[in-house]
Image (cartoon, coloured by chain):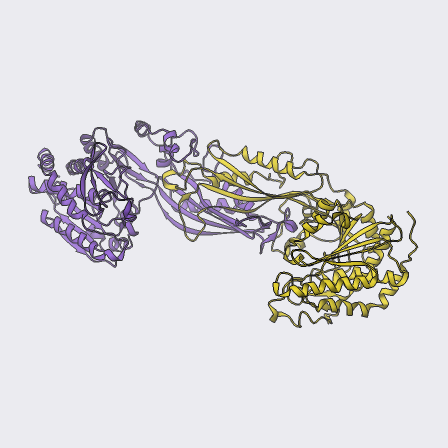
Chain colours: A purple, B yellow
Amino acid sequence: MTKPALSLEPVLDALDSAVDDSIERLFSLLRIRSISTDPAYKDDCRAAANWLAGDLASIGFDASVRDTDGHPMVVAHHDGPSADAPHVLFYGHYDVQPVDPLDLWHDDPFDPRVKTIGGTDVISARGASDDKGQLMTFVEACRAYKAVHGALPCRVSILFEGEEESGSPSLKPFLKANADELKADVALVCDTSMWNAETPSISGSLRGLVGEEITIHAADRDLHSGYFGGAAANPLHILSAVLAAMHDETGRVTIPHFYDGVEEVPAQQLESWKALGMTDEAFLGEIGLKHPSGERGRSVLELTWARPTAEVNGMIGGYTGEGFKTVIPAKASAKVSFRLVAGQDPQAIRDNFRAFVRARIPGDCSVEFAEHGAGPANILAADSPAVLAAKAALSDEWPMPAAVIGMGGSIPIVGDFKRMLGMDSLLVGFALSDDRIHSPNEKYNLASFTKGQRSWARILDALAST
Amino acid sequence: MTKPALSLEPVLDALDSAVDDSIERLFSLLRIRSISTDPAYKDDCRAAANWLAGDLASIGFDASVRDTDGHPMVVAHHDGPSADAPHVLFYGHYDVQPVDPLDLWHDDPFDPRVKTIGGTDVISARGASDDKGQLMTFVEACRAYKAVHGALPCRVSILFEGEEESGSPSLKPFLKANADELKADVALVCDTSMWNAETPSISGSLRGLVGEEITIHAADRDLHSGYFGGAAANPLHILSAVLAAMHDETGRVTIPHFYDGVEEVPAQQLESWKALGMTDEAFLGEIGLKHPSGERGRSVLELTWARPTAEVNGMIGGYTGEGFKTVIPAKASAKVSFRLVAGQDPQAIRDNFRAFVRARIPGDCSVEFAEHGAGPANILAADSPAVLAAKAALSDEWPMPAAVIGMGGSIPIVGDFKRMLGMDSLLVGFALSDDRIHSPNEKYNLASFTKGQRSWARILDALAST
């Protein structure tokens, strides 16, 4: 592969010179009331898509607005310096959350402005952070490359959806119908936060999920606990015993073969997480707790980012209303989910769990299972070229080195990209936890916007050499 | 005490000669639509009370209808052969269950008749068994004594209530206000069944009850199981562990001091229960189960009549609707009841349970308790004079010897008599499990009615000598 000769420094300079213009462009997009969940704003959503396609076309992208059963997609493509240059798919969404309660906003949510709050310059508007401000950081980086070099350092495809805030109903069908067009080497997803205002982060792993519902049946009707108590099987006892048996006293999951394939987090990774300075007390204190409850001897970050779990998410049986009823119910049920890490096979987890439960059901009782979804963990190895490139680029831009973190939850788009396009995702975003996304007075720090642009310029430069 | 010289045989003969008249009297009572739960039948309830007071007065009782906030009580007194003769209080209820669905009745529920069903003569009507037919067996026995001897062998008081089928709201206040008048040596309660059509039974013990509700609180809000799973305490796990720990693998309750004061059932009693021929398979087969689930090595009759239990009656927490939600709830709760036998102190059971739970709550979580009633077991020792007298009397009347059985459940009136009047209760009834009480086509076997009358004549005779 020929190393493209698109030097970075003039691109960064160009971005710095054009800050006012980039703010004006973002303002134009922010003024469009693209609330996807409310049919009253259907035309506004299309207007936002048209605006973006027009802006991308003006930079030289082959951009189009694509109809779906819901709000349209924006798809755009731009060549790289060569046909075999690295190919990225950048994802963002142009729709925004509703704005009510409107009386809690200090300014009109669709009349964006730059304000100084507590000494920090912020862009204030609905969507400033989630996700219009974020996606424009990438578009501005591309624009600067084109202005300076007339070219981009990688092949770049872009997908903007308009239904992220309303459950993305059109996304899967669209990915399926356009898989060949959208497939790239790696996806860049810009919809997450930094670790803190000085420390950028790359979410390199997301835990997988298996959902199960179990219903234990005992007697063929609800029983009076006076007449039958002490002799008849109580499904609440059986269920409690099954669920209690899932963990040993050290917090480890006891289901046979549960940890098969699970590897310990490399010491270096653990060290880097430790360096982030998040104590168990701080993490749990925010939710009114003190002690990590999972596997003993591991930090909360390791527990939530890199260890698998078995959690009971719901449980019901017998009489649960006001007062008391001395019933032995005919059945009892629970919803149980497993968060998976690399190396764990969702189907094997499900099978082993079911065998574990069945082994604990008395011969005259029975158990029913219902499946509630399954997906493996999504992992971009911390030492993969894309992660290393992004990490170096971000560390050059920000005061603190970039943190490669895990995410305990699932982000559907990441699973969809992996399953449907066979493509890993690199999650990089410049939002902050105090951006009040989804709430009144949403903001995006001006530094997030400007240094975000520079960050993408650096990341594209770094990825070009991978 | 002077032995009263009221010979039994002529009384039994008188009862046999008056069967047709006694049926007519019962029919008169059955025709009154005394449905206590439906205000439309308020006057009917009073009419039933008036009818009973009139009938008792006609035998020579000092009978009165007493107003309450609800339906009236009937109270009646009759002297015995001497001022220090044994004094019994007979309890029954004149109100009946609603009759809907009416179209499932083969005959008008308030037009009683004698029918032959499968070779057995039965009295068919609402209330034939529960409880008008039952209470009239006692009234007829008294009537025969008066007809033959002009006297009763014991001092007899009678209490008929009219709200038993609607929760007895007036009963406690009435007992409290009239405790001196109603207190007797022993209560005779005629509202239970025979062991089978050949075997009469005396319920000599009822288990007590302690009700508790526990709520375990963990985080100060519901959590996302992706972000916090594996690190944050899950109250459903804690609750399951607490409840599962209540029993060991042999089915024994593990709460410290739970069995303090509990004595083994005497071998002779166990033998007599065994002689009843109730197998575990038959008892459990009726409800779709096979294996006794409680303390290992004990029969279902011992388990339900004479052993204490800890049962979970309800449990709820987290997401329990359709589908799935990956939540770690802030709290989870369960309703737990304990059935108590002789020797167990309800307050000690409650205290020990709470200590048992508290010892299993992590330091950063908390537990709340709510009390749902408490009452000790009610026991009439199998070798008490009243039980022995009734047992001999019933065994003389029926084909099989009387069984002294336990009852696993609670009968509120028995607890009320004990607590408020300091009086034990002897539960003797002639209903059968196929009487369809509370259902369409309620019936009372003619033999239950006629041999029931003779049984009470015998019991009064036997009690007179105690």
Quadrant containing the C terminus of chain A in the rendered view: top left
In percent of width and height, residue A297 lies at: 42, 29
Q: Quadrant of residue A305?
A: top left
Q: Position of residue B134 (x, y in %)?
A: 75, 60
Asked if one can make out residue B435 in the rendered structure from this viewpoint, the answer is no
Q: Which of the pair A414/A66 is nearer the observer? A: A66
**Depth order, front residue of B298/B364:** B364
Would you place residue B365 above or below residue B274 in this image?
Answer: above
Q: Nearer the viewer, residue A245 or B198?
A: B198
Quadrant where the image shows the N terminus of chain A: top left
Residue B307: name its quadrant.
top right
Residue B315 or B29: which is nearer the viewer? B29
Number of numbered labels in the structure image: 0
On screen, residue B36 versus residue B151, left or right, reads left
Q: Is residue B350 shown left or right of residue A93? A: right
Using the image, determine if residue A108 lies above or below residue B106. Answer: above
> Left of B370 or right of it: where is B66?
right
- Residue B343: horizontal and vertical position, in percent? 71, 38
Q: Can residue A398 be seen at all in this image of the molecule? A: yes
Residue B330, image x, y percentages: 44, 41
